[in-house]
Image: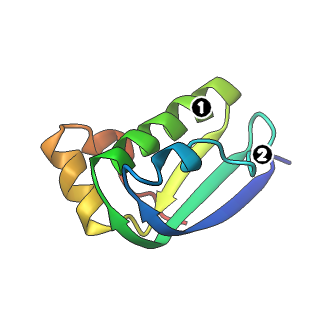
């Protein structure tokens, strides 16, 4: 059975915190699913969108399904502005 993990993120997802957010330690093995719950993100900017795109690329490299839940409105609006919202769309948990 494929491994499933959920990771709840808290705090800012901004230019000031982006570098420290790139590496996630909770990746499941190949074929698994990682759900990132963003409900605890209290501040976000365009760097946050970049971090999310990095996570998607990393998931592809690891052959892991990545799901986002509770995406903050600020990140959704920025993703629409940059025309990448379809890549980051929220998936049901």
Determine whether, in the image, residue 23 is placed left or right of residue 85: right
**Mark nearer the viewer, 2 or 1:** 1
Q: Label for residue 33?
A: none
Residue 59: percent from the left, percent from the top?
61, 35
The one nearer the camera, 63 or 56, is: 56
Classify mark 2: residues with Cα within 10 Å, few (<14), some (14-19) or many (20+).
some
Above or below — where is 6 with respect to 24?
below
Classify mark 1: residues with Cα within 10 Å, few (<14), some (14-19) or many (20+).
some
The one nearer the camera, 55 or 64, is: 55
Residue hosting label 1: 58
Residue 44: percent from the left, percent from the top?
33, 61
Determine whether, in the image, residue 86 is placed left or right of residue 80: right
Q: Secondary structure at mark 1?
A: helix
Residue sitting at the far top: 61
Earlier sequence position, callout 2 versus callout 1:
2
Residue at image point 56% right, 50% down: 21
Residue at image point 67% right, 37% down: 64
The one nearer the camera, 62 or 14, is: 14
What is the number of callouts on the image? 2
Residue sitting at the far left: 81
Residue 56: percent from the left, percent from the top?
50, 37
The quarter of the image holding the C terminus is bottom right
Q: Secondary structure at mark 2?
A: loop
Residue hosting label 2: 28
Above or below — where is 86 with respect to 37?
above
Residue 68: percent from the left, percent from the top?
48, 56
Residue at image point 60% right, 57% down: 35
Determine whether, in the image, residue 4 is placed left or right of residue 46: right
Which coloring applies here?
A: rainbow
């Amino acid at each position: 059975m494929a491994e499933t993990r959920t990771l709840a993120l808290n705090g800012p997802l901004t230019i000031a915190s982006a570098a420290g957010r790139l590496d996630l330690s909770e990746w499941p093995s190949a074929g698994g699913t990682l759900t990132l719950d963003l409900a605890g993100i209290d501040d976000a900017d365009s760097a946050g969108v970049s971090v999310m795109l990095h996570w998607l690329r990393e998931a592809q490299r690891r052959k892991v399904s990545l799901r986002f839940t509770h995406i903050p409105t600020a990140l959704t609006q920025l993703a629409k502005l940059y025309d990448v919202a379809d890549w980051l769309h929220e998936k049901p948990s």
